[in-house]
Image (cartoon, grey):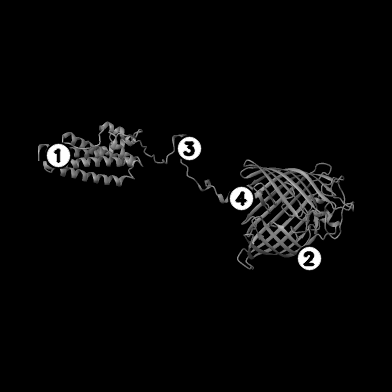
Amino acid sequence: MSNLSAISIFRLSIALLGSTAINLFAGETWGQTIRDRKDNTISREFQEYSPKTKKIQSVPSPSVESLDREKISTEEVRFEIANSEIIDSEGLANENNQDREHLDLLISSLLESLETSENNRDNSLDELSNEGNSLDELSVNRNFVVEKNQKNDAISDNKKEQESIYSPEINFTVPEEESILPSLEEVSFEAADLIVQEESEADIPNTENEIEVEQEVLGGDLNIPFTSDFGLGVFIGEPTALQGQVRAKPVLRGTRTSANLPATAYFRQKFGTTNNLLLILGGDLWVFEPKSFGVDLSYFYDKETSRVSFNIANIQTEYPAFNGGDREVNLPNGDKPIFDSLGVGVEYLQAFSPQWSVAFGVNYHKVSIRDDLFSSSLEPVDELGNRLTVSDRGQDDLFTLNISALYNNVDDSQFPTRGTRIRLGLDQAIPVGDAQIGFNRLSANLTQFIPVDLFGFTEGARTLVVNLQGGTILGQVPPYEGFTLGGGGSIRGYDVGDIGTGRSFILATAEYRFPVTSIQLLNEPLDLVGSIFVDYGSVLGTGDNILGQPGEVRQKPGDGFGYGIGLLTKTSIGLFRFELSFSDNGDSAIYFNIGERF
């Protein structure tokens, strides 16, 4: 082997040792420096270390300069591999190992070719030239990994341009890992905020017991929405301390109005998320002889657990206290008395817990008796001369302070099968105007839903419902403010108001509900529930202690007993009840009602 070959081998050995050392040390420290710098451009670092090189086309002789070029190319490839691992350490680790193995095979082939005789020098140089092309292609492949989708363009550019493959700048930004620490803008340096506090169970919100006034106030017995702000049905629920046709009292629901075919429509206008304007129209659709009409315009302002509301309401109806009985008593002109109330009120409702809510109200109404709906005539007495109003002119000023409370701990507010429901009422009339009406009314309504497995025809809940109601009035009692019994809301088997009107009353009901069958109606599954019930109520002999004695002059019994059977079904728009009942005096009645009776 000639001196030139020995020198070449010696220089190549030095190049290999140097590149190995650089790969070990510079590949970690220099590469880390590149990643920590803000301007992460590989080309700038390589421009400082190595000159630009041309692609090797041929090697005319094994000169020292040619071997130096090969040394530089080999070192540049090793630098590129080391820094490529930093660019994408996870995605390119396996590919870098393959490149190192390829480079080792390439160098071994080079050493074997140099150890051959000088006679094979041209062949060795040709192999070296070919290997130089391979080195260029390897570098291009490394740039392809960094500059995605540019492999073909990079190879073409290296064949045409006289610039090194390291010359084009390859800018990249090391992705920042998501930090678990807050930014400086989010860090508080207040001493109190730096104290670590453990979260207790009391601090964790309990969504199951979240108080929602909306569910307690809105909903009612029936709701058929056509849009989100317009529909049919009873829209205002309970408790409520305001006066209105569709506003339920704590006791004796459905005994203050008369209608052959009652209907209600509501219109609502929202102002933001806390303000609502609600208009309710109610009346009798029996066009031949309508018995009632009502309008209730309300404004609601909602808070998280409370509500403030105002309303203007008008009620006109044939009042049950002045109808029915064995003796018919009308107005002096022969018409039936029409109860007319027009007034305003303000209410504050507070939900103290998911079960307890209380409404406080102040109401002022002008109450009169007229001879027809929308009539202007005032009728202070009936045809027998009995008082219908306290005032001699047929119109009373009624100013009251009202409290209505509801405890609702049932499993289903629309159709309960277990739990307790309690309603309490307190009304204080303040003497104003000519009539100077003053009284205090107390009322209570307790219902217990008890699961009892007596009998049933299919799978489903079996429930015994026990209801007790009572009330009394202290002070002066106008005839339209007494407790009136009879009808589907009190004692079934009687018409509305047929038992009597008094200063005090009691009412007891026991009803057993059992599953009957399931049907499909208009693609809606319906569970039919049967019922067997018994009702008893009495005005406790107080019918003659009320102004005008409306029950006594119409010869109403004052107490009564009713029983019967029924069929109930819960639908998407409300609870429907069909009931066939009989009274202790031999009468019978069929009721079609909407909503829970208790």
| Distance (Cα) linking label 4 and label 3 | 33 Å
Labels 3 & 1 near each other (Cβ < 8 A): no
With respect to residue 334, does 453 lie above or below?
below
Callout 4: few (<14), some (14-19), or many (20+) C-alpha neighbours within 10 Å? some
Q: Position of residue 316 (x, y in %)?
A: 79, 49
Q: Which residue is label 2 attached to?
A: 584
Side of 371 where 166 appears, left or right: left
Which is nearer the N-term, disc 4 or disc 3? 3
Q: Which mark is residue 9?
A: 1
Q: Which residue is label 4 attached to?
A: 354
| Distance (Cα) linking label 2 and label 3 | 74 Å
Which is nearer the N-term, disc 1 or disc 4? 1
Labels 4 & 3 near each other (Cβ < 8 A): no
Marks 1 and 4: which is nearer the front? 1
With respect to residue 567, does 289 lie above or below?
above
> Disc 3 marks which amino acid?
Asp
**Element type where label 3 sits in the image:** helix
Marks 2 and 1: which is nearer the front? 1
Q: Which residue is label 3 attached to?
A: 193
> Disc 1 marks which amino acid?
Ile
Callout 1: few (<14), some (14-19), or many (20+) C-alpha neighbours within 10 Å? some
Quarter-of-image position of residue 526: bottom right
| Distance (Cα) linking label 1 and label 4 | 92 Å
Q: Position of residue 208 (x, y in %)?
A: 56, 51
| Image quarter in which the N terminus is found | top left
Choose between 302 and 568: the one closer to the eye.
568
| Image quarter in which the C terminus is found | bottom right
Which is nearer the N-term, disc 2 or disc 3? 3
